[in-house]
Amino acid sequence: MPDRVGSPPQRLVRRHPDELLVGLVSVSDRASTGQYVDQGIPALQAWLQDTIAGPMQVLTCLLPDERAQIADALRALVDERGCDLVLTTGGTGPARRDVTPDATLDVATRELPGFAEQMRQVSLHFVPTAILSRQVAVLRECPDGHAALILNLPGQPRAIRETLEGVRADGQSAGVPGVFAAVPYCLDLIGGPYVETRPDRVQAFRPKSARRQQ
């Protein structure tokens, strides 16, 4: 179940040095008021469970398209709950109520434009309207040394999977890598856990010098 906004925050306790602490935020006016069942969080949870090879804890949050609420939730997930990775879904288009990227930039200490560029590049293989996406990726770095990667993802389950996994090679083209291939090494660089993926879903990339010896 999604976290209740305003509930007393409790910091996650890492049960293993390589356990990934993830926050999932779904942004939708209608889903947050019960007009329909949210699909973003279940899709993200299922994808992560199928892709992450090691231990993982997940916190979830369902919010309306309100910039201040989204920013507060992102701060809480990183600063108070200790998440290493926060994935948002929904609210990234050009409509007036689409404010997820704006809220994400409100809490950022540094922007990572390469993730956003690649997300749009992947999506353009499927829909021409990908150029309308305002998705961003940022770091949030805390005074205590903790840091997290925050990625904005699309709202539809299929688009979430395509963005994370990329375009598969078909024998005639090389395919286009999804953005999650770069996430584990990014987490290494900001002091997060060593995350491994199942290569049949995502082949994570690390330079040879950053790979653990088996």
Image (spheres, rainbow, N blue to C red):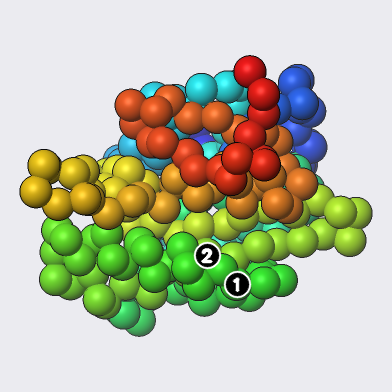
On the picture, is 23 further left or further right than 63? right
Q: Is residue 158 left or right of residue 160?
A: left
Residue at position x 35%, y 50% from top? 178
| Residue at disc 1, secondary structure | strand
Kindly indicate the quadrant of the structure image that contains residue 112: bottom right
Q: Is residue 189 visible?
A: yes
Residue at the limit of the structure toward the front, as seen here: 208
Q: Which quadrant of the view contains residue 125? A: bottom left
Q: Is residue 102 left or right of residue 43?
A: right
The answer to whether 157 is drawn above or below residue 132 in the figure is: above
Q: Which mark is residue 137?
A: 2
Q: Amino acid at mark 1?
A: Glu
Quadrant of res 132: bottom left
Callout 2–callout 1 Cβ contact below 8 Å: yes
Please state, as top left, top right, bottom left or bottom right, where the C terminus lies in the image: top right
In the picture of the structure, the residue carrying the numbered disc 1 is 111
Between residues 199 and 79, which one lies in front from this camera angle? 199
Three-letter amino acid code at the position of disc 2: Ala
Q: CA distance from mark 2 to mark 1?
A: 6 Å
The answer to whether 150 is drawn above or below residue 44 in the figure is: below
Q: Residue furthest right?
A: 144
Residue 35: % across, % down: 28, 49
Is 124 in front, or is 86?
124
Picture residue at 70% right of the left edge, 62% below the top: 140
Which residue is painted at 32% across and 43% down in the image?
165
Which numbered disc flags the more N-terminal residue, 2 or 1?
1
The reply to whether residue 66 is visible in this rendering is: no
Q: Give how far across and how far down residue 57 sits, in percent.
A: 62, 28
Question: Residue 141 at x, y = what percent?
Answer: 77, 61
Residue 60 location (% of width, % of height): 54, 40
